[in-house]
Image: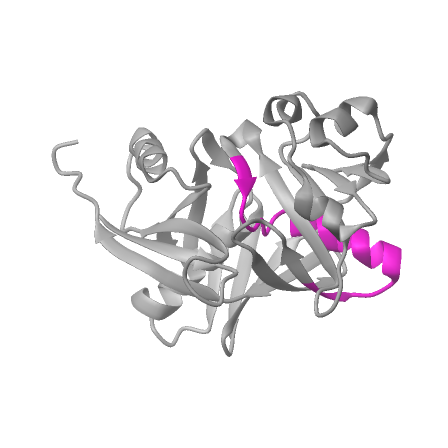
Amino acid sequence: MRQYIVDAFADRVFEGNPAAVCVLDRWPEEDRMMRITRENNLSETAFAVPEGEGYRLRWFTPSGEIDLCGHATLATAFVITEFISPGLDVVLFDTLSGRLTVRKRGELLEMDFPAYQLKRLEVTDQITEALGARPSEVWRARDLLCVFEDPETVIRLEPDQEKLKELKGALMQVTAPGSGEFDCVSRSFAPKMGVPEDPVCGSGHCHIIPYWAARTGRREFTARQASPRGGTLYCRLEGDRVILAGRAALYARCELMLEDC
């Protein structure tokens, strides 16, 4: 089995969020996909198989399958347009979150994702204790979204991973206004998925961008994920969709030796 390791939302290797990608002729057994995912020990491993006019795409974390992943989608589209079908400008994926379209725009890969509808929650002591700082606002859709007013607070957060597991929501997204070339900054924590911090979370920006669009009245944002690796996303809100664009860099190509497994 051929596997690619791609740094997504990255201008060069060792930035952005690494994802493993396997593009196959047919589906392996689910247990095998989980074993591969755990062996990779990355936040996501993506598996894609041709189906209809595009591909069926599935994403796995070390703790199981998930319904939406931005960086692994971008990484899979990069592999397909660079190595599987060079010259292809549009890739269609059917997923647990419906049809996702990725378009190649020069150096960028542009993804069309659903925007989450956020519901405001109370700022609680439990959330404050888990994060180690008190947010000004808390919102929830699939994930919790906690808003701070100072980007340095987001950058310096050292949350309690065990306490994060006790909170509502699949992941914890934190965000604050940006400065300079960046309109907002964020970090993503996913201990429930076996990932203490996701280096760059595309699906998290399906929460973050609708929030900032509603707050500012703007529709286009340059977003910075302020993890230790860091990554940049070029985003815009179009109705109930979030357009996420970024670059990708190939780190590795390898053969998985699975004949006797």
Residue 120's x, y, as percent? Answer: 85, 37
Between 99 and 242, the residue placed more toward the observer is 242
Residue at left offset 52%, top offset 60%: 9
Residue 52 at least partly seen = no
Examine the rendered structure and indicate whether residue 28 appears above or below residue 215. above
Residue farthest toward the left in the current orientation of the protein: 260
Q: Report x, y in % for residue 111.
A: 57, 62
Q: Residue at x 52, y 31 (%)?
A: 193
> Quadrant of residue 62 in the image?
top left
Q: Is residue 141 left or right of residue 124?
A: left
- Asked if residue 258 is positioned above or below residue 164 in the image, the reply reads below
Q: Nearer the viewer, residue 234 or 135?
A: 135
Q: Is residue 145 visible?
A: yes
- Position in image of residue 211 (x %, y %): 80, 51
The image quadrant of residue 121 is: top right
Which residue: 62% across, 55% down? Answer: 113
The quarter of the picture where the C terminus appears is: top left
Place of residue 100 in the rendered image (x, y in percent of width and height, measured from the top left): 55, 56
Q: Which residues are magenta?
A: 196-222
Is residue 44 left or right of 232 when viewed as pictured? Answer: left
Q: Nearer the viewer, residue 85 or 195?
A: 195
Q: Is residue 84 magenta?
A: no
Q: Residue at x 44, y 66 (%)?
A: 12
Q: How many marks?
A: 0
What kind of colouring is applied to the model shown?
one colour
